[in-house]
Amino acid sequence: MADEAAVRAQADTVRRLKQEKAEPDEIAKEVAKLLEMKAQLGDEGKSKFVLKTPKGTRDYSPKQMAIRERVFNAIITCFKRHGAEVIDTPVFELKETLTGKYGEDSKLIYDLKDQGGELLSLRYDLTVPFARYLAMNKITNIKRYHIAKVYRRDNPAMTRGRYREFYQCDFDIAGQFDPMIPDAECLKIVHEILSELQLGDFLIKVNDRRILDGMFAVCGVPDSKFRTICSSVDKLDKMPWDDVRSEMVEEKGLSPEAADRIGEYVQLHGGLDLIEQLLQDPKLSQNKLAKEGLGDMKLLFEYLTLFGITGKISFDLSLARGLDYYTGVIFEAVLLQQENDHVEESVSVGSVAGGGRYDGLVGMFDPKGRKVPCVGVSIGIERIFSIMEQKVEASAEKIRTTETQVLVASAQKKLLEERLKLISELWDAGIKAEMLYKKNPKLLNQLQYCEDTGIPLVAIVGEQELKDGVVKLRVVATREEVDVRRESLVEEIKTRTSQS
Amino acid sequence: MADEAAVRAQADTVRRLKQEKAEPDEIAKEVAKLLEMKAQLGDEGKSKFVLKTPKGTRDYSPKQMAIRERVFNAIITCFKRHGAEVIDTPVFELKETLTGKYGEDSKLIYDLKDQGGELLSLRYDLTVPFARYLAMNKITNIKRYHIAKVYRRDNPAMTRGRYREFYQCDFDIAGQFDPMIPDAECLKIVHEILSELQLGDFLIKVNDRRILDGMFAVCGVPDSKFRTICSSVDKLDKMPWDDVRSEMVEEKGLSPEAADRIGEYVQLHGGLDLIEQLLQDPKLSQNKLAKEGLGDMKLLFEYLTLFGITGKISFDLSLARGLDYYTGVIFEAVLLQQENDHVEESVSVGSVAGGGRYDGLVGMFDPKGRKVPCVGVSIGIERIFSIMEQKVEASAEKIRTTETQVLVASAQKKLLEERLKLISELWDAGIKAEMLYKKNPKLLNQLQYCEDTGIPLVAIVGEQELKDGVVKLRVVATREEVDVRRESLVEEIKTRTSQS
């Protein structure tokens, strides 16, 4: 019978003969053989199947899940520390819910096939579904988090943690409040989470859409080009200024003079001093929007000073953020290259969190256009997972993937029933217990299973123990064995595993 | 300007005039008016938007999430008690991964639009992705759980907890083991979870695909009709026998005699006694498959007796399960109507868990067809959510949706900075703290916020307290107030909230 490898080999032979311009007869003979083999393979049925996950997606193994749970726990703990509630929304939305929210990125949205009924798309982020949720339920005031997968038909780069299906961890504050207080809290949250996860040094870049728009205006960008020029500026983290400039001038038709004026501003980054300087800038200070944005930026930095976190915050005029819906403060956190990586300067290795203020989005959903001001942050954790996974691999740490406290084992044959009775008692008492699914497992195999999976205790039943009304409790690490009266076993296991 | 309501009113007017067969001129005038109004509305833009979640889906509010977390916790605790690891897989699979696994239910699969690239479908259950995962990673031995949303283009009945997007909580044991030990554990798990959740009385029906197939054979069903007749039997929980019988005979071309013979068997249900009786059945006992199935069923009941759970287990020959991939034991748990519902007999109100053995599924994915025997259970929790939600609504219980321990408040104006400083200290010490996002909130509003959201403590800063180096800590429930030295505040909050 033919198998796939043989078919491939035969196909190679045919290809080679054709390349070598062999005798037509000879080629024909080998082609016939190939066709016959392919036909045979067809008979075998399903073995032609491609065994993989879709492009840009991955499974999580138990070990990866253990790391994922750690990261989630740190993030959720932080969100709860700040008093957030939690919500969930469907993985798909009506297609029109997502339309007109993402600017140039809309082409990356996954649509569902029209199978009759509504036109649906997979969610692209958690922000638009949140705004839809607020408008639909007429909620004007909420602080919530939402952790879920989102979907983007982007070019995946999985080693760098860029997937087509990936988690976002969002925290948002919706409601009409005094300026910059919720905005400052969002930055505090990013600071807390990145510190807690110990991913190395990081920097949170901050800017404001109003400052950007004011800057565009004073640089001579026509109103109609604000959004598209903003998209170009957004690429500055991946492209050098010269490339961005030529995109602006050649693709987007901006005058070279305007582009050069923008070029001067987007180099600027700093703290309160830069804000003060720009508030004195003869052109910017004349622009109403820019002045508003700079005034709020000053207030934000005052609050961040009270939080003691300005050391890792940079007001950066090159930060633009791609999405259409931002209206005020925007920010993005990047991890910095470690010093021991032997790079001259600290270089950003990629964004791990981002967010900003979007005061108009809920109004786009409300039938009467009623606005609900919002500000929020999204932690992009795939890159964080990648880093954590590498850290765990590099360390000697052995990660347990179960929490089993005790293995119910037997030293002799014909004790399956006794093991079943004992493990049932333990389960009913809330003890995490396993047994091997064999009628007569060898003791050595049972002990080996504990070594492999990190189970700390073994409860051994044997004929003598049954007669004496005891169970032999063995500590895997020390090989210590004690007889424990059956009625005290649960207590004994609880005591011993709560200590460890 | 026209608004939507005015346009609808005008449309009604036109419709009425047409019905009343009014003068053509008059109708034309009103139609023109309608068109003009519609055009105006077009100018206003997006207000025509439908504000909803897709058919068969729903959002979870913070209160619903709190209930969901409780149910998940109970289930996950049980899965971990039985030593399960956890995995995750993508929400969509290659379309061909799902092809040929679900029999007649395949029409309910959601496909993604072909946007270039791979053809994808949303997962229909967690079992097929699990089998794909095992084959892809060449895993022959694992006990894992997986909790995630699955998707079915079914007819939704949301009040009864039937959705198009819904959670499944799956626990599966894969590997070559001695018979019925993992199968019995799956039933123990269903029993533990349904007992723990206190949903009222329940019954776990058990059958075996081999017994069904043997039964079909001895009743005279042709081999080629086994699966489709099995699908008909599966409808017995929703349709009376007469309707199922006519489906078999009229739609599926089964002989009336064969159908009647099936009709006799599928009435049977019981325990060990029924198994013994069928092992003596002159026809069934001659069928190799049926005999195997009955032998294993006997073993299963022996193990379930050791677990002490046979009281809620019924061997039921009418249980068929719709999916194609089952090969051995199958089971389904149903909640029984409460006695106080004034119904004569206890009637099942619907399935909340199901599962079975599928020894061939992994082999369908393995290039060499290597089999990995599997058995598993899936808890369908939407119906459980519905019941829990009703229970919470009916009770006086007030569900908190945050875990905030303390509100940082001030009694006087101009203390925003002091509140920000204090709350930052508390967050950094791991205290769950909130404050109102106002420069000068009224004390009454701050206290009211605590009442509304269940925050137990208030930390009040005022000018006098700042001078004295203390914070006034107020217990919301008792209105008791004490001055606490600033350096002891964290400890004091921790002590007071760990007690409650």
Image (tube, coloured by chain):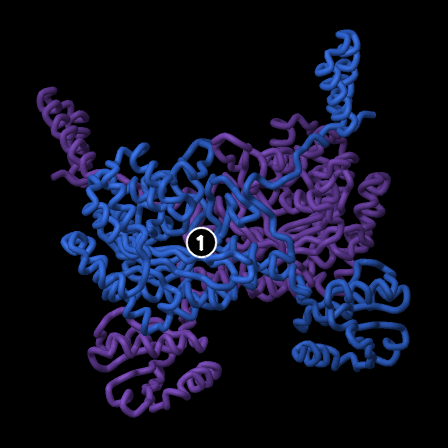
Chain colours: A blue, B purple
Of residues A399 and A19, which is closer to you in this image?
A: A19
Residue A444 location, x and y as percent? 86, 65
Q: Is residue B398 above or below residue B6?
A: below
What residue did someone put label 1 on? A351
For residue A25, which quarter of the picture? top right
**Residue located at (82% from left, 81% from top):** A482
Q: In the image, B475: left or right of B341?
A: left
Along the line of sight, the residue nearer the viewer: A137 or B314? A137
Q: Give the residue type that dot 1 points to.
A: Ser
Q: In the picture shown, does residue B149 fall above or below B451?
A: above
What x and y, as percent, mark residue B67? 47, 63
Residue B133 spot, x, y in % from top left: 66, 46
Q: Residue, x 30% and y 44% (percent of image)?
A: A230
Which chain contains the residue that carries disc 1? Answer: A
How many C-alpha atoms fall within 10 Å of the one at disc 1: few (<14), some, or many (≥20)? many
In this view of the protein, can residue B205 be seen by the observer?
no
In-front residue for pair B212/A86: A86
**Which element type, helix, strand or loop, lies under badge 1?**
strand
Viewed as shown, does residue A6 lie left or right of B195? right
The percent position of residue B404, horizontal first and vertical second, equals 40, 73
Q: Identify which residue is drawn at 36% across, 84% down.
A: B475
Q: Report if residue A195 is visible in the image.
A: yes
Query: Is residue A458 placed above or below B323 in the rendered structure?
Result: below
Quarter holding the N terminus of chain B is top left
